[in-house]
Each structure stands twice: as structure tokens, then as C-alpha cells.
Image (tube, grey):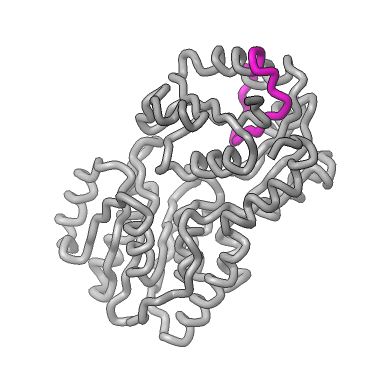
Amino acid sequence: MEVAILIINEFFKRNIEAVSNEMEYVKQTFNGKIVAKGFMKQKPMQKKDIQDNIFIYSKNIYEKELDKTLQEEKIKSIFIFEEESNANRLKIINSYNAKVYVMLYRKPTREYIEEQLKKYKKLQKIFIEVEEFKKILQDSGLDEWKIVYLPTPAKIPMHENIKIYNPEKVQLLFASWNNLDGGDTTEVRGLNYIVAKMKQDMRLYLNVILRDNKTEKFIEFINKNSVQDRVRFISVKNENDLIEAYDSCDFVIYFLQRQIIKDVPNSLVDGLSRGKPVLMTDVLDLSKDVSKYNIGKVYRVGEDADFYFDENIYQKMSINAFNYAKKHTQENFKKILLREINDEVGNI
């Protein structure tokens, strides 16, 4: 069967990593094939992946296999999940006559726009996760009609908040654990800061969804601060586990100390889809929407955060969060893709 669109990325971890899930949504929407580089110990060329038209290669042969795929399968359209320049990949793609669609999941820098984005010979559309990125791209000389706002899809179904909020026992959920992208998770992702707040405020409880089990440093830290009785680690085996984790919390938190991830973390989108307000630092661009639409609260890095909200304020934020998340469904994600690409690809 002819491949309608090739989906590529430098990083892929099936069923766990957020951008990898989005890649699969694109594959499902069209007759797609994924060619990517393994990430977070993703094993290459697994039988089940190949059956699902997902081809994962080790980094030393990834570009060679990408070139081979484009040559042998005569790919007509390429969907690239991208965050930074890659001269070798640009050269490979431009050597073929395929139309190019780019998904940006970080704020585009001037260097990236000039050295990568503008140099794709057959660039058709640029998909962005944050609306304000449109102005950045337009100011750099890119055509407005090429730029499409594509809200990050939630992994779990939408539902209004079912938990009764008790301001005297506040359940916080941290769902962005990952030790494999450089730096110390507990420090960079703000967990040390949260634990310090818990030590001061006995009303706070922390729930942590794990993506890996490298928890030794964090366990040592919570024990040292004597808050271990108010910290719960959650291993998610299926969608029901994930839903239960979100439904049992009051807030989803992300006190990032510096930018290391995509601008719209899926963990926060999933929380919003269950009516959970967001508490976060101003490092990521999503924080602007959190303030604008009153779907939580934003703190400056280093600010002494106050986590007290009365019931009325909380309920307003919760309702706003659920309504805001309506654009972040998988159905809307696929609807926009079909609208923008269907006529081009023509094989649905």
C-alpha cells in the first residue's frame, strides 16, 4: 500500500512520550508511516511497531534509513515534528520532491527559522501549538496562510471535575517525570521547590506520575524534609490508571525552573481536560493562556507561591479549565489536519 505521508522525528518513545503520541495520531488520520530515532530506551525495530508501520532506528543509522525510505517508497508528503535545525536532515528532504509539513512544538528562534524552516524547498504548512508563535513566523517573512494553529491533543477523554475541593487538604499532581533529558528532575522541574513548600504547609499533598523509576534522589530529598507521608508515586499501566490519577487531584502543577520541554506540556493539557486548574511558572508560553483565561495561576521563577484558594475561586478556575480544553481533543486535532492536508495528500 502506498504511503500517503511520512512522519518523522529525532525522538520517539511509544505510548509514553507526548510528541510520539501526536505522531501516531497523524499516522492514524492518514495512511501514514513513522520513521524516527529511538528515545528514552525505545528499542529499535520491534515486531509490533513494524506491524503498525512504525520504524524506529538507532541514531547511527537513522538518517541513512530515512534517505532510503524516501528513495524507495517515492514519498509525496512528509510531516516533520521539529524543534531545532538539522542540516543533514534538511539536505536529505530537499533532495526529494516531497511536500513538507512542519509541526513546531517549541517557540521558533530566529536562527531556526532562517537556517531550517525557510530552506525547505516545498514547505506547505507550519503547525504551531501556541497562537502567538504565528506573529513570530509572520514577522520573519513567512506567509500567513501557511501557519496553522493546531492545539495539543489530550491523551484522555474530557470530563468535568468530579472531585470535591477541600482547601485544607490540597492534592497536587506532577505528571511530567522524566530523568532522561538532562539535568536533575527534582531541581529543574521544580519538585524540590514543591517539597520545600510542603514542609511549610501541611495542607499540601503531592502525587507523582512516573515515566521512569529513577527516584532515588527524590526519595532521599522527601525523607530528608519529612514529607514522605504526603507524597504518592503512581505507576500508570493503562488509560484508566491515568484518568484516576488526574481525577483524584485538585491541581496539575509544573514549576519548571528553565525551559527544557515543549511549550504546551501534554501533562497539563490532560489535567485541563478533566477540569483541573494548572499551577505553573512563567517559563513556558502556555502560562500566558493560564493567566488570560483564568484556568489556574502563574508564578515567577523563585516567587514564594501561595497555594491557598477558596472554594468559589477554585470552582471558577475548574470550569474555565474544562471549557478551555474543548479545543484540545483528539477529534479537533484530526479535524484540523484533515482540513489542512487532506486535499494535498488525497489518500485518507
Quarter of the picture containing the N terminus is: top right
Q: Between residue 226 and residue 137, name the one nearer to us.
A: 137
Q: Between residue 155 and residue 132, name the one nearer to us.
A: 155
Give the quarter of the image for residue 198: bottom left
Q: Residue at x 32, y 58 (%)?
A: 241
User: As displayed, is residue 300 above or below residue 10?
Assistant: below
User: As displayed, is residue 345 above or below residue 284?
Assistant: above
Q: Residue at x 20, y 52 (%)?
A: 221
Q: Which segment is the magenta one?
A: 70-88
Quarter of the picture containing the C terminus is: top right
Left or right of 74 on screen, residue 162: left
Q: Between residue 3 and residue 126, name the one nearer to us.
A: 3
Image x and y of residue 259, in percent = 50, 46
User: As displayed, is residue 41 above or below residue 146?
Assistant: above
Q: Residue at x 48, y 32 (%)?
A: 52
Left or right of 165 on screen, residue 332: right
